[in-house]
Image (cartoon, rainbow, N blue to C red):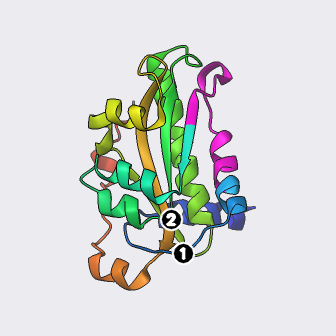
Amino acid sequence: MDLVKNDFIEFIKQRKSSRNFIYQKIGKETILNILECARWAPSGNNSQPWRVCVVIHPTVKRMLSELSEYGGIIEDAYVNLVIFLDLERGYDRVKDIQAIGAFMENILLGVHAEEDLGAVWIGEIIARKEEVNEIFKFSNDKFELMGVIAIGVVDEAREKTSEKERKRRLLDDFIDWY
């Protein structure tokens, strides 16, 4: 059991954001497996307040890319998952946003479990959330953009040239014991 636990902890620690992709098809079954991981995220009252637009079409990717300073990543990724908070399903804003965060992390872990795939969570696009809603013809009263997760086959050569040392704060920097 300890080996499995340690493998799982290492799996989590090895997940990283990938921003460089090779344009290569990702099968629908793989995308559905990743979303299957996401749907098991916890949510208050089991409200599951998420809505996902799976964007593969080049025209829709271009429209999204024009709304983000990371447009190149959005266009290079094979698929972009546009994640919304479904305001009608939610019941408590803070808990709903926490649930969406867990949902998105489960997506990132699901991608990490797939060989050769990588992903990055793009949050800066929420500054243009009303314009993103227009793309999908979503009412601002019913759906609130929470972010985009760009997914693709990792371009290992480009990743290595842009790779920075991965640093994390020491535990003592943010833990208080009582």
Q: Quadrant of the N terminus?
A: bottom right
Q: Residue at x 28, y 76 (%)?
A: 162
Left/right of residue 164 with respect to residue 142 in the rendered view: left
Q: Which quarter of the figure has residue 167?
A: bottom left
Q: Across the whole image, how many numbered discs are drawn on residues?
A: 2
Nearest to the observer: residue 149 or residue 93: 149
Residue 72 lies within the magenta run: no
Q: Which mark is residue 94?
A: none
Q: Is residue 28 above or below residue 138?
A: below
Instruction: Please name the residue that numbered disc 1 is placed on.
Output: 24
Q: Residue at x 29, y 72 (%)?
A: 165
- Residue that badge 2 annotates: 78
Q: Which residues are magenta?
A: 34-51
Mark toward the start of the polypeptide (1 vs 2): 1
Disc 1 crowd rating (10 Å Cα; few below 14, some 14-19, many 20+) is few
Q: Residue 120, relative to residue 128: is it above or below?
A: below
Residue 6: x and y in percent read 62, 64
Q: Is residue 46 shown in magenta?
A: yes
Q: Give the quadrant of residue 99.
A: top right
